[in-house]
Image: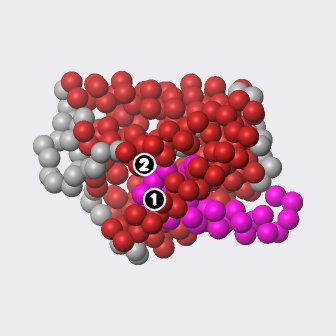
Amino acid sequence: MEAWYHYVLTVIVGFVVGFINTVSGGASLISLPFLIFLGLPPSVANGTNRVAIAIQTAIGVAGFKSKGVSTFPFNIYLGISALLGSVIGASIAVDIKGETFNRILAIIMVLVVLIIIFKPKISLEVLAERVSGKYLWIGIIAFFFIGIYGGFINAGIGFVILLFLHYVNHMTLVRANATKVAVVCIYTLAALAVFIYNDKVIWEVGLVLAIGNGLGAWFSSRISVGKGDGYVKMFLIVMVVIMAVKLWFF
């Protein structure tokens, strides 16, 4: 970052990302394009973004645990499977050409917007969880492929994980979220290691972004999800469409 205001912008974007991720999700669709627009090569932006994701999810895991919400050891099984997949995905992301990456990101952003708009509503009633036997193995296999995508780009993966855990494993939204942050934390550490090994991480930028993420998450936790979700969803859709067009054509 060449100018002082780049630090300010990065904290602000991190704040928005942390806020959105807490009340809805998918905000990496904002932080990743922002880092590219800031001048980072796509692969470096992808790797640097993982620093903030790792810190944010680690805090999330601690937060859920402090409230007594844990899906151990189910989350560990899924996390290890996703970790193996993420190494593959991150290795692909490291070598992909910048222009190709931007086009792929633009397509993914539009697809995630469609998921946000049309995803089925998740009910909050208590369900009989299915986290053992064949459903455990279905999860392990599915999360290996989820990990590949997570290691490659990660953007919007939270929606997919929540839908899978709710409809396949019959988890409530709270427990699905607790599982999600644990799994993402585990596989993000592996993906981050791949990016670090290939010198694709700028720590200064990643840590500044992480500061904003933490502040945004703290602030949004004081606001009702019911009041903020609709507004945040619309804001996210508008921003993602604008950035997708920018990535594809410019």
Residue 43 located left or right of residue 185: right
Can you tell which quarter of the image residue 229 is in? bottom left
Image height check: is 187 above or below 35?
above
Residue 3 located left or right of residue 71: right
Q: Which mark is residue 131?
A: none
Q: Position of residue 193 (x, y in %)?
A: 62, 37
As for residue 98 lying within the magenta part, the answer is: no
Image quadrant in which the N terminus is located:
bottom right
Q: Position of residue 176 (x, y in %)?
A: 30, 48
Instruction: State if disc 2 and disc 1 touch (CB < 8 Å).
Output: yes
Can you tell which quarter of the image residue 131 is in? top left
The extreme right residue here reads 2
* Boundaries of the magenta span: 1-30
According to the picture, the residue beneath numbered tag 1 turns out to be 233
Kind of residue indicated by mark 1:
Lys
Label 1 CA crowd tier, 10 Å (few <14, some 14–19, many 20+): some
Is any part of residue 194 visible from this angle? no
Is any part of residue 43 visible from this angle? yes
As for residue 6 lying within the magenta part, the answer is: yes
Residue at the image point whose x is 28% and y is 25% from the top: 137
Image height check: is 222 above or below 112?
below
According to the picture, the residue beneath numbered tag 2 turns out to be 116
